[in-house]
Amino acid sequence: MSASGDDAASSGRDGTVEPNEAGEDGAVDGGDAGADSGVDSGSDADAGPIDCPTTITQAGSAVAGEPSTLKLTSSANASTVFSAAPQSGLVLNADGTITGSATSSGAITFEVTATWAQCVSKQSIVINVGCPTQSVTPASLPRTYEHASFTGVSLAHVGRVGASTFAVTSGAWPAGVTMAPDGTMGGSPAFGMSHVVVEARDAAGCKATVTYDFPVCRRHGWPAPAAWTKTNYPIGNDGWVNGKSVFLDKEKAAYFDLSTTTSTSISEISILVGKAQTDSPSIVIPIHVYDGTSGSPDIRLGGGAATMATLMADLQADRETTIPITVTTLPASKKFFVSVELTNLRWTATAKDVFSIFSNTDGQTVPSAIWEKQSNNQWYRYNTAASWKLDASLYVFPTSCP
């Protein structure tokens, strides 16, 4: 019995062991299962977006100061949602379009977040912003004169984004000329030639340049001496000493000696007329330049012309008439004459054109600096008995440009 009890105990012991083992195994398995289940289900429930690879491309363009046409796309999913902080006036929208107008040029970096499904990708996307077409105006500067006031000229930066600043990057303005950072020019320039490169740079960092060849010309004898008194010298009802008259003089000429200057050419002539009236404003008044080395008008060197319409308009505006001419080289002596031809003007019984060049008053230029070609084609000095016995100068001023 005891053996049987032992067996029973053993059997019972075996029986309790097995269930216990099974239970332990079950508990372990169940625990393992529970642990596995708890881990898996917990991970799924708390999982964040997965870092997924994608290629972000851009299409369109961005130009500073102009509406952007850029759009980002993802190679992973057409429904990708984009986000990034705005940069330099550009805004990245959820659909990948970049709107707005860039306030700066060059490389702009967006830190882009792209999301789709459970995926996310973060990338640095560089946008290259171009500059709009720009220029600096005017393309050339007006001719200016030594010691004259250089005003009314302002440079402009066409196509700029925001405010612009102007600066000389090569060369220098003539002495006496100034340019403010906003492009406003002024001053009283000295004679000479300058080659200047000006750069205009705007708030977006875009720039444009212009090159100027800037001659400052010298108008010889201008302004007329303060002691001079402008005079017309009428000849009763028969016309004017310094212009058209019953005597039918052909030309009136002013003498110049530039031997003490550096000037070697003449580019224009300025004439101040005191009388000009005709019913035929298309009449042409020729201007001639003669070699004066011999002491009287000699070989013709060049010239130009003006119409009576121009002369009358300038007289009404109380200004001199400036006439372009072509004399590329003065004689070695630098002595020459500038004449005004009168032969196209009329002095007949039925038509009398009124024309007179201002001169100063007798005695204010000694000896006389005026010659005339009379109807006999001979030249005479004004202060001679064959002429008017006047010592004077005409208001005629040649201009030399470097």
Image (cartoon, rainbow, N blue to C red):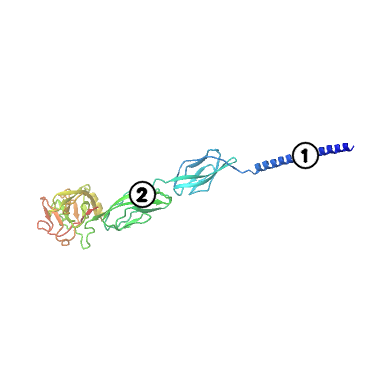
Work out whether 220 lies above or below 131.
below
Residue 350 in view: no
Nearest the eye: 70 or 67: 70
Residue type, mark 2 in image: Thr
Q: Report the side of 215 relative to 95 (left or right).
A: left
Give how far apart the Cα atoms at labels 1 and 2 are.
Answer: 94 Å
Quadrant of residue 333 in the image?
bottom left
Q: Nearer the viewer, mark 1 or mark 2?
A: 1
Name the N-terminal-most of marks 1 and 2. 1
Q: Quadrant of the N terminus?
A: top right
Nearest the eye: 305 or 355: 305
Identify the element where label 2 is drawn: strand
Q: Report the side of 6 relative to 188 (left or right).
A: right
Residue 327 drawn at (x, y percent): 20, 49
Quadrant of residue 83 in the image?
top right
Residues tagged 1 and 2 counted as in contact (Cβ below 8 A): no
Quadrant of residue 366 in the image?
bottom left
The tally of labels here is: 2
Disc 1 crowd, CA 10 A, few/some/many (<14, 14-19, 20+):
few
Task: Return the mark for residue 21.
Answer: 1
Residue type, mark 1 in image: Glu
Residue 370 drawn at (x, y percent): 15, 56
Residue 322 in view: yes
Nearest the eye: 333 or 343: 333
Nearest the eye: 339 or 150: 150
Q: Report the side of 116 relative to 11 (left or right).
A: left
Q: Which residue is mark 2?
A: 209
Residue 269 drawn at (x, y percent): 22, 52
Identify the element where label 1 is drawn: helix
Task: Return the mark for residue 357.
Answer: none
